[in-house]
Amino acid sequence: MAIATAAALLAALGGALWLATRRLVGPRGQRLRGGPDRGLMKGKTVLITGANSGLGRATAAELLRLGARVILGCRDRARAEEAAGQMRRELREAVGSEPEGVGELVVRELDLASLRSVRAFCQEMLQEEPRLDVLINNAGIFQCPYMRTEDGFEMQFGVNHLGHFLLTNLLLGLLKNSAPSRIIVVSSKLYKYGDINFDDLNSEQSYSKSFCYSRSKLANILFTKELARRLEGTNVTVNVLHPGVVRTNLGRHIHIPLLVKPLFNLVSWAFFKTPAEGAQTSIYLASSPEVEGVSGRYFGDCKEEELLPKAMDESVARKLWDISEVMVGIVK
Ligand SMILES: NC(=O)c1ccc[n+]([C@@H]2O[C@H](COP(=O)([O-])OP(=O)(O)OC[C@H]3O[C@@H](n4cnc5c(N)ncnc54)[C@H](OP(=O)(O)O)[C@@H]3O)[C@@H](O)[C@H]2O)c1
Ligand SMILES: *[C@@H]1O[C@H](CO)[C@@H](O)[C@H](O)[C@H]1NC(C)=O
């Protein structure tokens, strides 16, 4: 009995040690880029949606360090101002007595679940921002219960795809005038389980929260493909990425039983990326000279990756584009 207990304890200890080692010296423990390229984004204006939390926030903090004027497009001004204040403080601590070369943060209200809000936001952008060099469509909602946007769209499709579809279209003129400029779309590997079911884009016949998330992330990729085609020859590029599995607030609608929480926390600590790690591909696509002129591609861990055929279907991409125009009321 005592031997069995001792063995179990030893096994648990060994497991914990292994996890900690993996965490600290594994690939995710490697030091992030930092330092020499400060000033790389000087003079550039970047808009990041959902920049008060998780990946968006980590992306904003790094582009700020690189010298950009970073606009945080967020639905809750108080949460965004708080995040901005904290980012400024953290940067000040990091750069110490040599703050020259760092950029600035600007908070603007943007609720992607409201076409009215998207339009108002873009109008303000066009009036007040002389240029836009990088647009990062990052905000997202994950596996929420059935909900509708202000305009009656299923929430995940409405926010992750349609809100960003309208936003991008309304800012396209500004991006073209600022060329060479870049659009970056944050999708997910879970696109693989999605499908663009044109007969029920609003999920009125049936709703599956996981299917609808995957569908919205597949829509992000098809949108990127079609937009890249439309932007050929403009010097505006658009690429899409998956960040990996990252410890953020994205799982807020997922219920984890209280007893399982410590185990979940341990596993996520050991195996999930930190937001700063997960944001590396967004930062790379937004700032690296290596991807200048590259467009219509899918990236993970700062490298191009292959897509399933369903994410490259040109006729589905075109049809989705046309229907999205009608849904958000873009008149030509
Ligand atoms: N975390 C992962 O493992 C993972 C994996 C694959 C892909 N992704 C993608 O990464 C992106 C960022 O997610 P995250 O992991 O950083 O999650 P997060 O911490 O929950 O951040 C999501 C951001 O989106 C914002 N947002 C949600 N609904 C919005 C709306 N209606 N209007 C404007 N902003 C809205 C949130 O604002 P509030 O704070 O106000 O709610 C928040 O700022 C998402 O597109 C997600 O699909 C994440
Ligand atoms: C795109 O950039 C190239 C190289 O800088 C330039 O020669 C060309 O005129 C640009 N095209 C447009 C449409 O701005």
Image (spheres, helix red, strand yellow):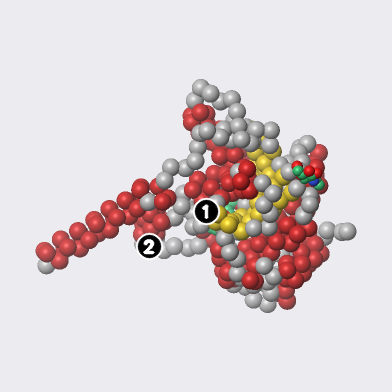
The kind of residue on which mark 1 rests is: Asp
Instruction: List x then y, in percent, for residue 92.
Output: 52, 29
Instruction: Quadrant for residue 125, please give it.
Output: top right
Please name whichever residue, 155 or 128, is drawn nearer the observer in this view of the structure. 128
The nearer-to-camera label among 1 and 2 is: 1
Q: For the residues marked 1 and 2, what is the alpha-carbon distance in whole angstroms?
A: 30 Å
Q: At 78% across and 36% down in the image, what residue appears? A: 130
Q: Is residue 111 visible?
A: no
Question: SS class of the residue under badge 1?
Answer: loop
Q: How dense is the environment of label 2, judged by Cα within 10 Å: few (below 14), some, or many (20 and up)?
A: few
Q: At 77% across and 67% down in the image, what residue appears? A: 318
- Write down the residue under mark 1: 301
Question: Taking 62 as reference, is 322 left or right?
Answer: right
Instruction: List x then y, in percent, for residue 49.
Output: 65, 48
Q: Is residue 199 visible?
A: yes
Instruction: Quadrant for residue 315, please give it.
Output: bottom right
Q: Which mark is residue 260?
A: 2
Question: Taking 313 as reference, is 17 left or right?
Answer: left
Question: SS class of the residue under badge 2?
Answer: loop
Question: Taking 227 as reference, is 213 left or right?
Answer: left
Residue at disc 2, CB closer than 8 Å to ligand 1: no
Kindly give the residue lying farthest to the top in the view shown.
97
Q: How dense is the environment of label 1, judged by Cα within 10 Å: few (below 14), some, or many (20 and up)?
A: some
Instruction: List x then y, in percent, for residue 11.
Output: 22, 61
Please name whichever residue, 44 or 140, is drawn nearer the observer in this view of the structure. 44
Q: Earlier in the sequence, mark 1 or mark 2?
A: 2
Q: At 67% across and 67% down in the image, what residue appears? A: 312
Instruction: List x then y, in percent, for residue 80.
Output: 61, 42
Q: Is residue 317 above or below residue 84?
A: below
The kind of residue on which mark 2 rests is: Val
Q: Classify the position of ligand 2 by quadrant: top left, top right, bottom left or bottom right.
A: top right
Q: At 64% across and 65% down in the image, what residue appears? A: 218
